Image (cartoon, grey):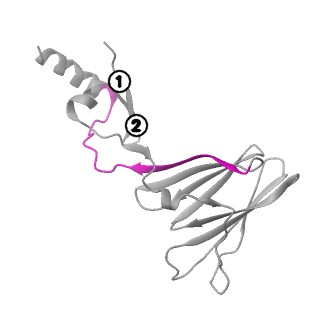
Amino acid sequence: MKRALSIFVCAGSIVLASNYVEQHRLVPLLQYHDEFKDYYPKLHNRHNLNGLDTSQPTVVLDAYDTMKATFIQSQGSVAPSLGNVTIEGIDTETLQVSLSGFRSVRLEWVGSNLLYFNINIGHVANVESLLNVREKKWIYSKSIYYNKHSKLKIASSHAVEATNANASTASP
């Protein structure tokens, strides 16, 4: 018989659960989906930030200093937040990426070809995207939902094992 294995984060510790999850119909604490597609970054697009208060540009260089991503965002009472990322580098044409509706943005180079976007859009939601700047295409974009209302109340894997043992002896 196959047993599904799920990993949950609970009170700072990782909890492994198998059929306990199915028996109690628990929802994983971290869910990936495409529900927040409106917040995905858009390639070859740029917001007009003229006349708006903007932040100082934030520059993120790759490990070899051959690629540069410059992020600038609207500030103040502009809702939703607007931002632009300009990507420049050796042997690549300049790319523009627009972002909107975010609370915060983290950019990180993975080598010198891939730019990782972590876009916080709310208390319990993020968007992750990975852009191949050489091929000018998105490799990955997903919405992440942090389920704060899960029924999982277990503090250690020992509790899961004890619960599973009790459940298996109680059932026919």
Left or right of 161? Residue 109 is: right
Mark 1: which secondary structure? loop
Mark 2: which secondary structure? strand
Q: Which numbered disc covers residue 49?
A: none
User: Residue placed at 25% from the left, 28% from the top?
Assistant: 20
Q: Residue furthest right?
A: 91
> Where residue 120 sits: x, y (%)?
51, 59
Q: Residue furthest bottom?
A: 51
Quadrant in the rendering for residue 27: top left
Residue 88 visible in rendering: no
> Where residue 98 sits: x, y (%)?
63, 65
> Where residue 128 sits: x, y (%)?
55, 50
Residue 62 belongs to the span the image colors magenta: no
The front one of 21 and 130 is 130
Question: Residue beneath label 2, please?
Answer: 13
What segment is highlighted magenta in the picture?
136-158
Left or right of 16? Residue 46 is: right
Left or right of 90? Residue 145 is: left
Comes first in the chain, label 2 or label 1 = 1
Callout 2 touching callout 1 (CB < 8 Å): no
User: Residue placed at 75% from the left, 43% from the top?
Assistant: 111
**What type is the residue that disc 2 sits on?**
Ser
Q: Does 41 appear above or below 5?
A: below
> Where residue 72 sits: x, y (%)?
67, 70
Q: Which numbered disc covers residue 4?
A: 1
